[in-house]
Amino acid sequence: MNVPFDSGLAFVREPESLRAALAVRAAYLSIADTREPSHYTPEASRRARGIEVWAALKSLGRNGLAEMIERNCRLATRFAEGLSRAGFKILNDVVLNQVMVSFGDAGKTRRVIREIQNDGTCWCGGTEWHGQTAMRISVSCWATTEEDVDASLAAILRIAL
């Protein structure tokens, strides 16, 4: 959704259960019949992190948000297909926006990750996937295009081959 990682909303069937789990009671806190925001978050002084989620939903709408998510998933598949065609092993089923790829042994995979980060065309991090060293490609930006993926693939393949 292109919001800070700790943003979110919780939808609950029984609001009283949520309030009972999160409400903080102390002699110095006033209790009123009105809605107290601190009774709905685990951190009483935390700013309203749901605002970013609300803003994304308000500006994109349901269809716009769905289109963005679907596009990012398609672009992840484009990454996986390009890497697979070049002979590299895709370690995960690419059903969302994440691709885990191995370039052979752990040393080579780490080298490709380091060099693509230094290259600056895109940023991909390292991870372990089922005990195997992998490059993690996460397509999550609303502005990413097919051209961006193609340029990133070209850079990755130039480095890896």
Image (tube, helix red, strand yellow):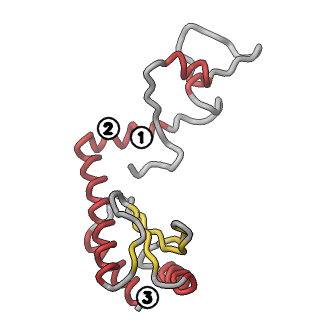
How far is disc 1 from disc 2 in space, using C-alphas? 9 Å
Are the residues tagged 1 and 2 within 8 Å (C-beta)?
no
Answer with mark 1 or mark 2, whichever residue precedes in sequence: 1
Residue 52: horizontal and vertical position, in percent? Answer: 44, 41
The residue singled out by tag 2 in the image is 58
In which quadrant of the rendered view does residue 106 lie? Answer: bottom right
Residue 122: horizontal and vertical position, in percent? Answer: 43, 74
Toward the bottom, the furthest residue is 161
How far is disc 3 from disc 2 in space, using C-alphas? 42 Å
24 vs 108, left or right, is right
The residue singled out by tag 3 in the image is 160
Q: Nearer the viewer, residue 83 or 146?
A: 83
What amino acid does circle 1 point to?
A: Val
Answer with mark 1 or mark 3, whichever residue precedes in sequence: 1
Location of the C terminus by quadrant is bottom left
Kind of element beneath mark 3: helix
Q: Nearer the viewer, residue 123 or 51?
A: 123
Q: Nearer the viewer, mark 3 or mark 2?
A: 3
Q: Residue at x 53, y 34 (%)?
A: 48
Q: Is 79 rendered above or below residue 105?
A: above
Answer with mark 3 or mark 2, whichever residue precedes in sequence: 2
Q: Which mark is residue 118?
A: none
How would you rate the neighbour count of disc 3 (Cα within 10 Å): few for under 14, some for 14-19, many for 20 or more?
Answer: some
Q: Residue at x 33, y 72 (%)?
A: 80
Kind of element beneath mark 2: helix
Residue 111: horizontal and vertical position, in percent? Answer: 54, 85
Are the residues tagged 3 and 2 within 8 Å (C-beta)?
no
In which quadrant of the rendered view does residue 40 lie? Answer: top right
Q: Residue at x 28, y 71 (%)?
A: 78
The residue singled out by tag 1 in the image is 53
